[in-house]
Amino acid sequence: MAHDMTGYAATRRAFRLEVPERFNWAFDTFDAWARDPGKLAPALGLGGRPAPPNCRST
């Protein structure tokens, strides 16, 4: 698909998001973050408990 977007409506009609048949966005996102030791882990769903030291509360 062309990326110049000279015609917004035509570009929008022609757009197709290519997602692999077996795609897990959480695995691809969070596991990639976890491989970087310099990044903090997001603390999700802690139910009011304090976050571990390597996490930040969201």
Image (cartoon, rainbow, N blue to C red):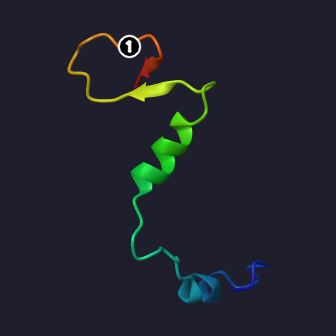
Judging depth in this view, the residue of 7 and 58 nearest the camera is 58
Give the residue type at disc 1: Pro
Q: Residue at x 44, y 19 (%)?
A: 55
Q: Residue at x 77, y 83 (%)?
A: 6
Position in image of residue 40 (x %, y %): 53, 24
Q: Is residue 30 above or below residue 18?
A: above
Judging depth in this view, the residue of 2 and 44 nearest the camera is 44
Position in image of residue 14 (x %, y %): 58, 89
Position in image of residue 57 (x %, y %): 40, 20
Residue at far left of view: 47
Which quadrant holds the N terminus?
bottom right
Q: Residue at x 39, y 71 (%)?
A: 22
Residue 43, quarter of picture: top left
Secondary element under disc 1, as helix, strand or loop, is: loop
Q: Is residue 20 above or below residue 54?
A: below
Horizontal side of 40 relative to 4 (left or right) equals left
Mark 1 is surrounded, within 10 Å at the Cα level, by few (under 14), some (14 to 19) or many (20 or more) other residues, namely few
Horizontal side of 33 relative to 50 (left or right) equals right
Residue 58, quarter of picture: top left
Q: Residue at x 65, y 80 (%)?
A: 8
Q: Is residue 51 above or below residue 26?
A: above
The residue labelled by disc 1 is: 52
Position in image of residue 11 (x %, y %): 64, 84
How many numbered discs, if any? 1
Horizontal side of 27 relative to 34 (left or right) equals left
Judging depth in this view, the residue of 17 and 6 nearest the camera is 17
